[in-house]
Amino acid sequence: MIEFFNMGGYAMFVWPSYAISALVLWLNWYLPRNQHRKLLRQLQSRHGSQQQ
Amino acid sequence: MFLWFHKFGSPPHFYRIAGKWIPWLSGLFLVLVTAGLFGGLIAAPPDYQQGDSYRIMFVHVPSAWMSMLVYVAMAVCGIIIMVWRMKLAEIVLISSAPIGASFTFLALVTGSLWGKPMWGTYWVWDARLTSELILLFLYLGIIGLHNAIEDKRVAARAVAILAIVGAVNVPIIHFSVEWWNTLHQGPTVTKFDKPSIYWSMLLPLLLMALSFQVYYVLALFQQCRAELLRRERNSKWVEEL
């Protein structure tokens, strides 16, 4: 197990590569999703106030 | 066929279909990426020259491939915009830009993290690295240009021209390692004869590449849905949602 995390001495290059890839891919997934939800909520409240 | 194309290109239809596909694409991506990571990090043996540092390849190479693939997709959208003025192509083009920029950024960062232990430096002004950096600037230029123009239909045409012209960089990146004498190694997979890599390393690499492609469609659909809603907020189909 320790051997696996050590990556033959290259741990400080291998793991940051994977970490930053995961972070950037997650951001590309999360940000538009969040924005989409916010827009939907905005539109709903606007639509609701028009009807009253 | 044409009818289908027309229907698929209509914003409300695309919005609905994309929404339906997103969970399936997420599942497929997770399966592929898990298999790829297992193959790449655990099952594949260390390289006889580079030890375990070569495992960076499993994120570096797919990112680099995707950085070019996304750009080609954007250039194709650019042509569609110039010829048919198709609204959906405008949205796909501009929604692709941040995803493509991310892949380019990842290719550069993971490449430099790989370069340090193998070449002894994080960065050199070599043909492959420089042309990939230019690609990043192209992406950022496209995003900036789109933000700078208020009328989004005009912005789309300006961005389309930039995307088409910039496409000249893609073959330069691909062939840079053959045209110039560079520090970056030559292609191992996309050669005309047999790839010079063992299947135990090639298979996870291809799995990761496939998962990144699925990811692109997934992220693109999500970005497109947000962009569509923002642009068409006053139209009738949005009100009906």
Image (tube, grey):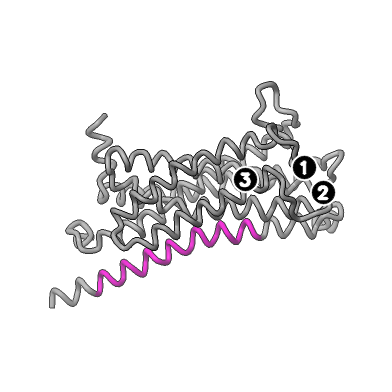
Amino acid type at circle 3 is Ser
Tag nearer the camera, 2 or 3: 3
CB under 8 Å between discs 2 and 3: no
Badge 2 element: helix
* Picture quarter with the N terminus of chain B: top left
Q: Earlier in the sequence, mark 1 or mark 2?
A: 2
Residue ID at (43%, 47%): B162
**Horizontal side, residue B199 vs residue B9: left or right:** right
The stretch of residues the image draws in magenta is A20-45
* Picture quarter with the C terminus of chain B: bottom left
Residue ID at (72%, 60%): A16
Amino acid type at circle 1 is Leu
Local crowd at mark 1 within 10 Å, few (<14), some, or many (≥20)? some
Amino acid type at circle 2 is Trp
Q: Which residue was labeled with disc 1?
A: B183
The chain ID associated with circle 2 is B
Q: Which residue was labeled with disc 3?
A: B131
Are the residues under badges 1 and 3 in a single subunit? Answer: yes
| Residue A20 screen position, x and y as percent | 65, 60
**In terms of image quadrants, where is residue B109?**
bottom right
Task: Report the Cα–Cα distance between label 1 and label 3.
Answer: 13 Å
Q: Is residue B128 above or below residue A43?
A: above
Q: Earlier in the sequence, mark 2 or mark 3?
A: 2
Which disc is residue B207 wearing? none
Q: Which residue was labeled with disc 2?
A: B119
